[in-house]
Amino acid sequence: MAATAQQSPQPVGGKRKGKSQFLPAKRARRGDAGGPRQLEPGLQGILITCNMNERKCVEEAYSLLNEYGDDLYGPEKFIDKDQQPSGSEGEDDDADDAEAALKKEVGDIKASTEKRLRRFQSVESGANNVVFIRTLGIEPEKLVHHILQDMYKTKKKKTRVILRMLPISGTCKAFLEDMKKYAETFLEPWFKAPNKGTFQIVYKSRNNSHMNREEVIKELAGVVGSLNSENKVDLTNPEFTVVVEIIKAVCCLSVVKDYVLFRKYNLQEVVKSAKDSQPHPKLGNGKEAKLEPDSKLNQSDPPEGKNNQQEAPENIEELGQTEPGSETQVGSEGGAKPEPESQVSEGPKTNENELS
């Protein structure tokens, strides 16, 4: 009887179906649209940091992104593939073949889930207090800039737990050679002749110990310089900011505008007036640091979340997100001095820690 019970679930072939073969259907039933469940190379999206409440962060992100997404791109439309030929008639002759039947099953599941691909879909980021929203059919940089521009003008606060919102236009493996090769193509729209501009590079690493910040900065700065020798470093008010966010073995890249104006893309800070953004002297959260030497600024980076605990909860930037020393928001304070380009990741000194 036991042997019979084991063989009964095998209507088409000699091999028993593994659990992995049923996962796509399970994900479709959950409404996950069959997309990736975690951050991986090849995705576009929006990286969002929050203050210890990821579930609420996802809710706020969906609400905010859908509001402004409809404004820019119109109401969301699901991908409809019902009218495309499925090829099922051609596979009827092979119905007795186990491999063909399995391929047909997977194809049917894929077709059904693709109809439900959403414009925005949360995936596992791989780091605490970090949410990654995968995007389809939109330009992350354009959308996030639109959101920040509106909030900057209206000064209307629309989130409670979301801190920073960074567009991610490309992801690759977090290994130096992979990043360099990927950046040579990725950075072309902004920096390849005849295009040019002033720039800085900001770097942050989470849950990753094999990447060297100075090496990454030097290589990426070299790529920008090779695309056009007229690209110049500006640490005060650059036209473009190259954002490098590394989480585990994935490198997230984007090139954004108005990084200084929009307060490091911090949604809590961008709605404050100039008067409100001045911190109390006793808080020591960065405004005082602009008169200190770079060495002291470096020392203030690792415990920045600790320093900010005196502020309101929504200003606790990425509290507990990474190990000490891996949170360098602005890359090359104290970087390789003989190489001028290694300093391109240093943020404007006047804004070093004020938003972190």
Image: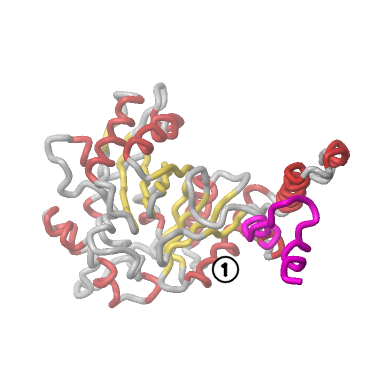
Residue drawn at x 56%, y 57% as measured from the top left:
37
Q: 272 left or right of 215? A: right
**In the picture, residue 351 is in which quadrant?**
bottom left
**In the picture, residue 326 is in which quadrant?**
bottom left
Q: Where is residue 104 in the image (x, y as percent from the top left)?
A: 77, 45
Residue 343 higher or lower than 20, as above or below = above
Regarding residue 283, the answer to whether it shows in the image is yes
Residue drawn at x 31%, y 62% as measured from the top left:
356
Regarding residue 241, the answer to whether it shows in the image is no
Crowd class of label 1 (few under 14; some 14 to 19; many from 20; radius 10 Å): few
**18 in the magenta segment:** yes
Q: Give the range drawn in magenta.
A: 1-26
Q: 2 left or right of 302? A: right
Q: Where is residue 198 in the image (x, y as percent from the top left)?
A: 32, 35
Q: Position of residue 172 (x, y in %)?
A: 43, 42
Disc 1 residue type (three-letter): Glu
Q: In which quarter of the image is the N terminus?
A: bottom right
- Return the residue nearer the eye: 135 or 92: 92
Residue pointed to by mark 1: 59
Residue drawn at x 79%, y 52% as measured from the top left:
12
Q: 101 left or right of 237? A: right
Residue drawn at x 41%, y 26% as measured from the top left:
195
Instruction: Determine whether the residue tagged by mark 1 lies in a helix, strand or loop.
Output: helix
Coloring scheme of the render?
A: secondary structure
**273 in the magenta segment:** no
- Return the residue nearer the eye: 3 or 337: 3
